[in-house]
Image (cartoon, helix red, strand yellow):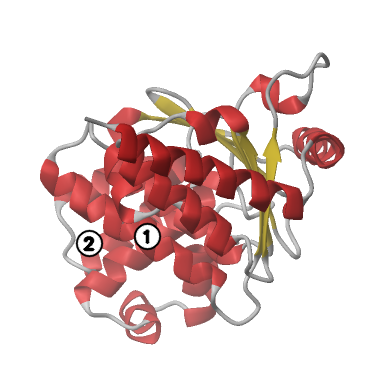
Amino acid sequence: MRRNSGGTPKARALGAELREVRSNAGYSLRDLAKELEVSHVRLQRYESGETVPSSEFVAAYVTTLSAPAQTREHLTNMARDADKLDWLSTATSGARKELTTLIEFERNANRITEVATGVIPGLLQTSDYARAVMQHLSLDEIETMVLMRVGRREILMKPKAPNLVCFISEAALLESIGGHAVMTEQLRHVVKMSEWDNVDVRVVRIGTTSLHPAHMGSFILFEFPKATPIVHMEHYHSSVSLHNPGTARAYQDAVTNLHEVAMSPEASAEFIANCADEKENDIDDTP
C-alpha cells in the first residue's frame, strides 16, 4: 500500500472510478473486501481517495470484478502517480471521465467557488444551454453528458449541501450561446437558483480600469472540511487540478479579492434579470 497525504485530485478521481466499476459489477463494499481478503474500511479509503492503492492492488481489484482489460490498464496507470499533488488531464481521458472527476470533487466539498469568464457555471446550466456548450460532441455523448451535468445539481439539495459561490463575468451573460431563447431561459434559471440559501451568484462587470483575478481566466475552487482545497481549471484540450497548499491559498486570496470587485448578490440578480429581458426582446425582434 502506498502512503500519501490523501485527497489528491487524481486519488479522488481514481477512487470514484473504482467505486463505479464495483457498483456496475453488482458488488457491495463488504462483498468485495471479503473476496480480496482485506478490510472494508481499507477499500472505503481507496474509493474515497483518502489513501492511494498500489497499482498491483488495483489490478487485483478490477480482475476480481471481471472488468475489461482496457479498464484494468487505465486504472492501474492512474494508481502509479495518484499521490502527486497536481494532475494534468488531457482530452484523451474523455469528457465523461472529466465530468466524473468534477462530480467526485463536488460530492465531498463543503464550499465550491467558480469563477466563470466565458460560459455559465456547470452547476447552474439548463439542459438546452448545456447541449449548446457540448455541441462538439456526438449526439449520444451529448445526451449522456447533459444528464450527468444536470444531475450534478442534486448535490446542492442534499443534507449538509455545499455552499456554491459563482462569480460570473458580464461577458458570459451577454453571449447568446444556443440562441436568444436558450440564453433567456438560462439567465432566468440563474436568477431562480440565486434565491437558494446555499447559492451565491455575483456578477463581475466588464469595463474596469483595474486588473483583478477574473482577468486571468476561469477556475473552480473546491474546499473540504478536513483536506487541502483543490483548484480545477479547464482548457481547450486539457484540464489541470492543483492540490498544493500554497497554490490553494493564492486562489483563496483571489476569491477574497473578487468579493470586493463583484456586484452584490441582490444587484447581480437584478442585472441578470435585465439581461434576460433584453434577450427576450431580441427574440421578439427576430424576423
Label 1: state its secondary structure: helix
> Which residue corresponds to mark 1?
150
Using the rendered view, name the quadrant where residue 63 is placed.
bottom left
Say above or below: 134 vs 33.
Answer: above
| Amino acid, disc 1 | Val
Q: Residue furthest top?
A: 209
Judging by the rendered image, the residue that carries numbered circle 2 is: 63
Residue nearest the observer in this picture, 266 or 111:
266
Q: Is residue 113 visible?
A: no
Which circle, 2 or 1, is nearer the viewer? Answer: 1
Q: Report the residue at 76% width, 63% height from top.
A: 226
Q: Tell me the quadrant of the picture where the C terminus can be found.
A: top left
The image's mark for residue 219 is none
For residue 204, side relative to residue 235 (left or right): right
Position in image of residue 80 (x %, y %)? 45, 41
Q: Is residue 260 above or below residue 287?
A: below
User: Is residue 146 at least partly visible in the picture?
Assistant: yes
Kindly identify the residue that appears in the image at 54 percent across and 75 percent down.
157
In the rendered image of this protein, does residue 214 appear above or below residue 166? above
Check disc 2 and give the amino acid type: Thr
Measuring from the top left, give residue 178's x and y in whole percent.
30, 37
SS at mark 2 in the image: helix
Q: Quadrant of residue 109?
A: bottom right
Mark 2 vs 1: CB contact within 8 A? no
Disc 2 versus disc 1: distance between alpha carbons?
Answer: 33 Å
Camera-side residue of 100 and 75 = 100
Label 1 Cα crowd, 10 Å radius (few <14 / some 14-19 / many 20+):
some
